[in-house]
Image (cartoon, rainbow, N blue to C red):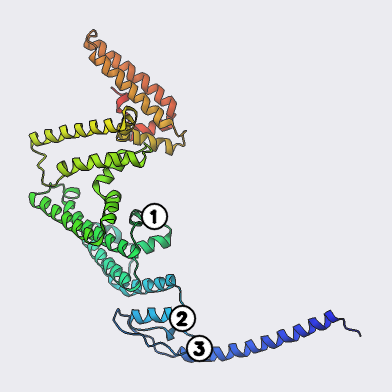
Amino acid sequence: MKFTKLTVLLLAMNFAWMGAVGYLIKKLHDSQTTVGDAENVPPDETVKVAESKPALTAPTTSFHWRQLESEDYRTYIQRLRSIGCPEQTIRDLIIADIDKTLAPRMQSIIPRRKDLKFWQPEDEELWNNYDQREWFKQERSIDQEKREAVRELVGVDLVEERLKQQGKEDYYSRRLSFLPEEKRGQVRTVLETYGSQEQAIQEKVWEDGEPLTVEDKAQLHRLQEEKQTQIAALLSPAEREQFELWLSPTANAARNAVYGMNATEEEFMTIYKLRKTFDETWNQEGLDLDNPALRAQREQAAKQLDEQIKVQLGEERFADYQRAQDPDYRQLNATVARFKLPGNTANEVYEMKRVLLEQQDKVRADSNLTPEQKENALKAMADEAEKIVKVTLGEKAFSFFQRRGSGQWMRK
């Protein structure tokens, strides 16, 4: 039989492939024998964060994870890096190990039954028979330990890292993105540490219904000053300016005030600067706003602030500014979104409100009308406005809007 050149070539390649497969099978057998020996190494009992230099493992013909394990996290991390392990994988391994190490402490906080029976109302009893605030306090303490360890070992913030892995929104990461990662974690820790302390004081108002004492207010003021001092020590002047624009109470109030305006940076900065001057005088913790005279002065200063903003923005944009701060307008937007109405519907309905209130003011000011005529005119105008709004929103959306406590202007 004659063989073509192509046939000869294919046969040669086939023999070469069979030889390679045989060689790989032999190597695999040798490797399994070595790995089996390595698995007899006794496991480490604990993993600790400690200062020490790694003893790098000598190269071998086989690999096993126990060659990298160490009682010292830093040694473990350096060994992982020495074999080219990706940083993200190192982070995942360290975080998982720390979670596992501290899990027994976390589980011991809530006194659950070890052997729960189906007839036992454990959840209800735990909720009613204990003060959960103490549990949350202990959990926060352990979480803080984890965060400090993770930041020390791999240089990332644990909360930020977990949210990133879950694909969830991270409030602080987005607002502190102008900072390098390490500094961002430091600032975040300061904010959350002092936030917890401030919350503990405010719980008197939120949970116990008790007003803050003079001492409470003084302590809050002291905590806020300490927080600002620590943040200032971490940031450069330019970074501090950016921090104020992103996270200061004044900037938050200014952002809240331009809701739905599609404000420009210039408009925001105009409002921010004017509000900052006002806040520095009138939003201090030490002010006694229970004093009628002082409260009247603050109200007058607030009116002057609005006048200054109106001058800077102009009549039309100031009207948008006022609309943005009306709870009715925000609820209108929520209603429009929920019922998938045309995007401009909220503005249209709010314009009806503006016109109605304007006309009602004229009726009240009309000296030619008797009180009864005024009352009838006001009711007729409100009834007509309600009909128009109901048609504009639709029956279900209108009902939803009213159930949220909105639309009082249609009931006068």
Q: What residue type is labelled 2?
A: Ile
Q: Distance between the residues labelled 2 and 3?
A: 18 Å
In this view, the mark in front (1 or 3): 1
Mark 2 / mark 3, whichever is N-terminal: 3
Q: What element carries label 2?
A: loop
Mark 1 / mark 3, whichever is N-terminal: 3
> On the rendered structure, is 293 left or right of 29?
left
Q: Residue at x 42, y 83 (%)?
A: 68
* Residue 91: quadrant of the picture: bottom left
Q: Nearer the viewer, residue 242 or 336?
A: 242
**Vertical placement of residue 276 versus 111, above or below:** above
Q: What element carries label 1?
A: loop
Mark 2 / mark 1, whichever is N-terminal: 2
For the N terminus, the quadrant is bottom right
Q: Residue at x 36, y 38 (%)?
A: 263
Q: Nearer the viewer, residue 355 or 377?
A: 355
Furthest residue to the right? 1
The residue at which mark 3 appears reads as 35
